[in-house]
Amino acid sequence: MTTYDDRASLTDLTSTAERIRRSVENVIEGKPEVVRLSLTVLLAEGHLLIEDVPGVGKTMLAKALARSVDCSVRRIQFTPDLLPSDITGVSVFDQQRRDFEFKPGAIFAQIVIGDEINRASPKTQSALLESMEERQVTADGQTYELPTPFMVVATQNPVEMEGTYPLPEAQRDRFMARVSIGYPSAEAELEMLDVHGGPPPLEDLQPVAHAHDIVKLIDAVRTVHVAEPVRRYTVALVAATRDHPELRLGASPRATLHLLRAAKASAALQGRDYALPDDVQALAVPVLAHRLLPTAQAQLGRRTAEQVVADILRQTPVPGAAAQQWPPGARPPGLRGL
């Protein structure tokens, strides 16, 4: 049950998220939906994969989000010679103490930017698996907790495949959502020439929220109510990917959990303390598509995972407003497509 204090937290959430959004959009022009998805993933305790062609601002988006929040930030430039210990850390022998001392790697930060993540070897990529799922690092038999909040924002280029190692399914499944920035509109590109023609706007970006604020907002997102019909609808969408004839690999139970968490964060960002099927529908493609593997026949027919998810959304019945168990005091609006 949502209390008055929870509703006050959601009010704080929307105002803080709005400040972060405006800060990031000072650097990333004309892409409000991309910025909003980034915030959604941050508040849903997820990780973000930014996949697009070179020069559209993938790294700029990650750095703008990191600088807008007063958190510890580390950037890892993934290269073929990068070692797992460069990410997790290494034990070094201390001559004075006559003992080994653990030196934390770049993963020990609240926001970690992994630039061109698919340029490192699979062995190095796997160094992120434990930290992204369990928020901890195990080295030499010792387990070290990572700071809170913790978010990995990784970028990769899907066009240039020479000298790259595609992310394995287990790695992609750890990312809550994948987003493509795309080319800007003519107006946004013209504005970019004016803004970026002088001093880089990223240098003037100042934090508009603190790490402890983000932790409180994450706690507020957890209080968002999800009715049982909405939960069943989420499970039905994910289950449909496992039986679809055009997919040889469907979404995992982790994907179901990620989709529900993202829907709760999306509802909170809109000032609601309850989630709607609309929230699930809006996030189904960015949360599910990168986890799916189309069959050979689907690939020959140039069918993408995004198109398959769109088909599943059209075919899966949406719960009606009367069937949704709203929390006390909530006034549900009309739903689209009912």
Image (spheres, rainbow, N blue to C red):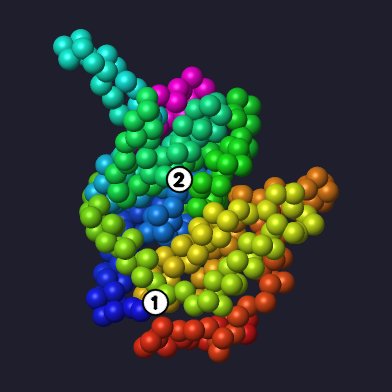
Label located before the other in sequence (1 or 2): 2
Q: Is residue 202 left or right of residue 232?
A: left
The local secondary structure at tag 1 comes to: loop
Viewer-proximal residue among 325 and 164: 325
Give the residue type at disc 1.
Arg
Q: Is residue 179 above or below residue 101?
A: below
Residue at 53%, 26% in the rendered image: 123
Amino acid type, mark 2 = Glu
As drawn, the label of residue 187 is: none
Q: Give the SS element for disc 2.
A: helix
**What is the magenta range?**
74-86
Q: Is residue 229 above or below residue 64?
A: below
Residue 235 picture quarter: bottom right
Q: Which residue is mark 2?
A: 133
For image coordinates 54% across by 71% down, the residue present is 231
Can residue 186 be seen here? no
Closer to the camera in the image, 75 or 173:
173
* Residue 236, magenta (yes or no): no
